[in-house]
Amino acid sequence: MSAGMKSVLRGQQRRNNRLLQKTEFLGRRVRSEIMPIHIDVSKDKSLNQSQIDGLQGLQKEAAYTAIRSLESLARLGEVDHLGGGLELIPPLLLTLSVTDYDLVEYTIEHAHTSVGYYAALSAMGYISEQAVIESFRRGLDIPGHVSWLPGGTQLNGGRLGVMVPVAVGQALGKKAKRGKGSWIVCHCGDAGFVSGQALNGFNGADVHGAPITFVMHRNGIQLSGSTESILNKDPRVMVAAMGVEILEIESLHDLPALYKAYRRAYMLAQRGRPSMIYPTGRQQTLANFAKRYGIEEEVKDIANSNDVDLNSPIWIPGSLMSFGDVESMIECIFLVNHLPGGRGHHDGHMKGRDVDRVLSNPMLQINARERRALSGLRRRSKRTVITKARPQSGTPNLRLPLSLKKRVKLKGIGEEDSARAGSEAGYAIIAKRYPEKVFVVSCDLDPSTKLAKARSYLAKDHQFEMSIEEQAATLMADGLAMSGPEPQLNVVSTFAAFFEGIAREGFDLWRYQRNLTGVNEGLNVTFHVSHVGACTGRDHFSGWGLDWINVGLTYLPYLHRFYAPADARSAFIATCDLAEHYGGHIIGIPRDNLPILSKQDQSAPLWETTDNWEPITEFRKFKGANRAILALGAPAFLAGDVAESLGDVDVYIVNGFPVDPRSLGRLISRYPKGVVTIEDGFIGTAETGLRGFAGLIAGLASEAGCSAKHLGITDPRTAPSEGHMETWEHFGMTSKDLISVLKDL
């Protein structure tokens, strides 16, 4: 690594550390003393008046905090999603009251409502009111979308629809491990439900009986206009068609009715029946609506200024955007009813508005009953909640005794086998040893990806077939990892070609899953990427995963390890290693038969089943060698053949990443005549420059002052439909090509 790069990295680490040191609510273990309001949804049949009054008082305190926070942002010229945030607060406070952070948890799909989320956490006592007002969208603690804080959800949101299958995975994992009483509540909007991830997630919830309830905030408004003008579809029909039971109520702002729906949904969840609480709204006059909330004068002024008849029947949505902010709330109602003066307030804000006037409206005034309820709560002993971070990446996970590994029989030297045989054996002994701690999400490919044997040792509630819904399957696996912090192995498998395309969202979810420590790191999930490179039989272009190495390197900051095994035995070792360490893993498995690699003296296989995984393995070593081949993955045997024929070239197999760049740099510097890399993947073009493993080594070789040449796939536009050897020959990846490139060094 160059001195310049080292300096850049050291500087970034210093800045990271300074930022982490300034956090107020993050850490490995956070103790919170909060409002003593907890409702046992399994036993409490209804809310009593004191609970209703207390929750309504907390709603107003949270709304005050959210509005003050947006006033603070307005002074910086910034806006946020105040409308959705205010709307979220009332139902979310009920959810926080039934959550026990063990059997019952929650998440938020429409994560742009985050100011309401943070304000609700503040009202409950998890974080300070002042922090939300002064720090929202201005630091690591309280960012601009839903992120994990004490009392919050681990599932950091950002993209609409994505959290549906993730929450389903979380619910299924909790059900399998904890059983009766498991329940996940997922607050969602009326936009993301139609995304492919969400619809596939609803389907998965039904097929596998997830104990989950979706609370839809049906406000009729989206980013650029009313929901009707963007996508005029009834969510109930579509969601019910996927197998989710619809529970209709009139309004999410009617706490007794909402809690009754929660009770019904919880009971359904215990029978393996997913549900959605759907607020229908109601037809009524604007005058009657205003009277209900004591805002007759305010509504009259707004109606008169827009020539709107107070006595005309209109639709009042069952979830009200900007709830409590009277002017904005009425403008939203006008918009969905096609009335003059209507505005959306999706990007609600306080720019140019009088905050004292907003806060003084009747809907935000705490009445005497609510004040008494809040005072009573504050006199009682606080409720203690301990929030613990997930284990750090690399923490010991499912350890396997050497005696078990030793009994595994794999092919030996002189034989060929698919690397899939090694991973199959690895997953099988892990599943047999830890059947209660292994979960597999499948995409109708287990016979080919070789997860079927492992599944034979697992109970039905530890394996989930999702057919060809690869995107939802990867997200469900992410959710399984969130079902508890204890050691477990969560595997999702499909072909590399699908991971590179439609399943990428599962990888991307890692990027915004913050641990409680403030670090975004890979979840405890293994992405089993099969049929990598052009080593995919005779499937031709549609079956190739030529970018698999670049994908793995792209996500490396969030991973514990990325494995590229070169034969069946190294695949077995890699599989055992990923199970033994907590964190995110990608393993790329070639399809076709490859020779079992041997030690240089042919005395034994290069790897024994009891060996520990290592990033680099010395494969061939010759006295006086001044050139070397660095091989990644399947083509390693070609490098060995060439070295044997030349007798003056060393060979190293890179088994995966990360590899210490200093070690690689020292290794390269040993070879004054240079190094050659070979990999079965896309290494770039003249226009894009080097990519993949080749790009990494090119940079290190340049720093070491060594020559470097590279073999890989550069132009995949035209190719044969034959076996991997013929395909490699077409792309210039043969023993003959290796020898030629070595001579050119």
Image (cartoon, helix red, strand yellow):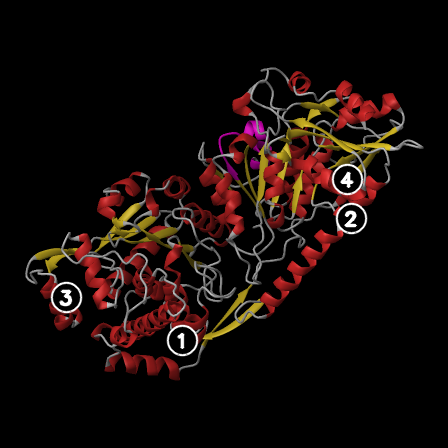
Whole-angstrom CA distance, mark 4 to mark 3, is 71 Å
Q: Residue at x 25, y 58 (%)?
A: 319
Residue position marked by numbered label 4 in the rendering: 701
Q: Amino acid at mark 2?
A: Arg
Q: Amino acid at mark 3?
A: Ile
Provide the secondary structure element on which disc 2 rests: helix
Residue 223 position within the rendered picture, expressed as x and y whole percent measured from the top left: 31, 51
The magenta segment is: 441-455
Q: Amino acid at mark 1?
A: Pro
Residue 83 position within the rendered picture, expressed as x and y whole percent measured from the top left: 30, 61
Residue 189 position within the rendered picture, expressed as x and y whole percent measured from the top left: 32, 52
Residue position marked by numbered label 1 in the rendering: 36
Sequence-wise first label, 2 or 4: 2
Whole-angstrom CA distance, mark 3 to mark 2, is 68 Å
Residue position marked by numbered label 2 in the rendering: 662
Q: Nearer the viewer, residue 642 or 574?
A: 642
Q: Nearer the viewer, residue 442 or 597?
A: 597
The residue furthest right is: 623
Front disc: 4 or 3 = 4
Sequence-wise first label, 4 or 3: 3
Mark sitting on residue 189: none
| Residue 473 painted magenta | no
Q: Are marks 2 and 4 in contact (CB under 8 Å)?
A: no
Q: Are marks 2 and 1 in contact (CB under 8 Å)?
A: no
Crowdedness near tag 1: few (<14), some (14–19) or many (≥20) residues, C-alpha within 10 Å: some
Sequence-wise first label, 2 or 1: 1
Whole-angstrom CA distance, mark 2 to mark 1, is 54 Å
Provide the secondary structure element on which disc 1 rests: loop
